[in-house]
Amino acid sequence: MIDTLSHGNNMKRITILCLLFILLPLHVFSQGEEKKIFVLKTDNPIEVDGFLNEPIWKKAYEANELFQTQSERKSSSLISTKVKILYDDNFIYFGFSCYDSKPEEIAALLKVRDDDLRDDDSVYILIETSQDTDIYYYFGTNLIGTQFDGIITIDGRTANPDWNGIWKSAGQKTDFGWSAEAAIDLRSLKYESGKDKSLGLSLSRIVPRMLESSFWTGPLDPAFKVAQLGRIKRINLAKAESKIKITPHIINTSEEGTKSEYGGGLDVRYDLSQMVSSHLAIYPDFATVEADQELINLTPFDLYVPEKRDFFLEGSDIYNQKIRLFYSKRIPDIYGGLKLNGRAGGFELSGMSAQAMEDEYTGEGEANFSVFRLKQNVTKSSSIGFLAANRLIDGKNIGTAGIDTLFQFADTFNVMGQFAVSYGDYKKENIAFFLRPSFDSETFHIHAGYTHLGERFGDNVNRVGFIKDDNRREVDTGIGIAFVKDKGDIEEFRFDSNYNVYFGMDGDLRGWRVDGGLTCDFKNKFTFFAQRAQEYYAQDVEIPLISGEDYRNHETKLGIAFNRKEWELAILSFTFGQSFGHSFSLLGISKNLQINRNLAVEYELGRAYFGYGRFYRNQFVHALRATNYITENLMLKLFYQANTRPDNHKVTFEVLFSYRFLPPSGFLQVAYRVGDPRFGMNDESKENTMYLKMGYSF
């Protein structure tokens, strides 16, 4: 599969991970003595206006020892930062004093929530609420109080930027530079109440004009480990009251050539405790969810399509596994569903049950889908988990269950493993497992893994999960070496290679694949890459489209990228080779652009040329997104895509107008759609449709 089009969609997570962990001072991750700070409790709430002028701020302890900026520039002495912390029964307050000898150069433009604040002078907070869990909350703000937040889990390896906490922020220009205040509502965090508790903490500040040398130096890989933080000591955390949020909505659907239809739904969120929450949805609205993006597929296997529906997307990180036992895209529209999520005592729990409607695409009847996930941290960076997923239709159960492990034996060595069994139509050859030890240092990576997928394992799992190919014994080895790191104009020059061999359950060779690539990252924000892949499929492999003869495929990919920051991302790549007896070439273009502080545009193009002897076929896939925040409460979003594949021509066009009234409680949405929103489906059965949705939260 060529991932030209999907690359841009992954950049947001990469941006957030880079931001949070590269910007965190590197000494936080060292093996030195743990830093500690004691915080003062206030009896009076702090007015969050950006001025640290309440008398109690003068009495608060300074957290300066937690905050040391590393820089090679002589001009680093021109800035300094002081941080103070207070709390009461409802909030934790942070006060930043950002000294700057050049206040005229302080940048403050971005005002839309979750914008990439690295273009502005900004400050960041990372909080770990319990050492027994692997969840970290991050918060960032700039001079004008713009908010940037999310959750990081699994020792810094995954990020969820869709999480929005409850907090206040403000900033002000001062005679010494600027100051900022942030008040984080404890009700939006999962923590264990009690006296003399401890919270993990890290603090960061970014100055755009000193970005490269001040915050982007040093090795990248160790910065992705949240192994050691400073700590807020002896804080008394009051027990939060249970809270409930009820959001009813009504929706009108007007499809071309038919009468208008009215419907409604209900969304209920209830926190059973500070650590356990539930979510009930009745007739949730999926109509206004953005359409799946079309991709060019050069393989004989199904493509994995990311989930976009909020009900399934929220908290879905916990279901990610090497062998995917649960894949929410298997679930069509639902009558309703119930979710439960919680953390306590080193355990993480998630469960969901949804009653699905008849699937209009497959013709299958109504069904119940259920998934249960339990994970326990064995150590700070090691865990063992259990997952079971089931589909019940016409009284018949089909699904899978299994355990997975991650053991971090040292900073550089870990072992991942998983074992699963499927059930349903097939009761034999339904076992799967894998084991993969790996070693990672700043400049070197090596792994060797083995995966076993029973001959009928995927036939059961693919009713609830995602297995692209079973009847497979796979040996997977890989190596990566950074030959040059942070020298001269080069940030990193790296070679990566992977070798996979596939055998059937009968021991016969099914195929192999060899990948190799060179990547050179320059400090001027450009990246050059070259990749080469060769693969072989045996003639007796029972895979759609390729049975009957041996195939030797090869592809070469060359490309250039500019700036990994999301809203300045640009990628140009060209791939050519042979795929299953046919020559091909593939041009890929991705460009993200922040036109101004309110308007962001993303564009992706994939152009494939296939040769069939004297015949050829062109395929284009265009995708364009534009988001315009007209005001803080008024947003206009556009999505357009076209797939010119001859046997599945498709055009999708969507416009979404969203308005928040009596913010943040009320909302009004108007959406217009042309084409089928589901991946791979053509437009034959879909007419132009208008949606009008209104809701209010109590």
Image (spheres, helix red, strand yellow):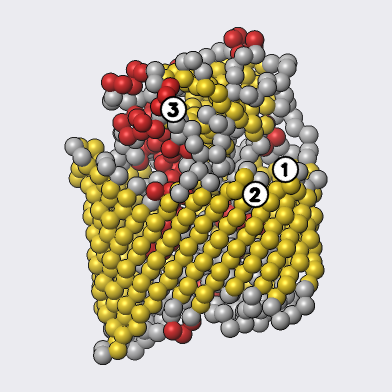
Give above or below for 309 relative to 665.
below
The answer to which of 344 and 282 lies nearer the viewer is 282
Q: Point out which mark residue 106 bears.
A: 3
Q: Where does label 2 land, which residue? A: 634
* Type of amino acid under label 3: Ile
Q: Are discs 3 and 1 less than 8 Å apart at CB?
A: no
N-terminal-most mark, 3 or 2:
3
Q: Dot 1: few (<14), some (14–19), or many (≥20) neighbours within 10 Å?
A: few
Rendered image quadrant of residue 7: bottom left
Residue 122 position in % (x across, y down): 48, 31
Compute the Cα span from label 3 to label 1: 30 Å
Give above or below for 87 relative to 579.
above
Residue 304 appears in the rendering: no
Q: In the image, is 339 to the left or to the right of 261?
A: left
Q: Kindly identify the residue that appears in the image at 80 percent across and 68 percent down.
A: 262
Q: Where does label 1 land, which residue? A: 663
Quarter occupied by the N terminus: bottom left
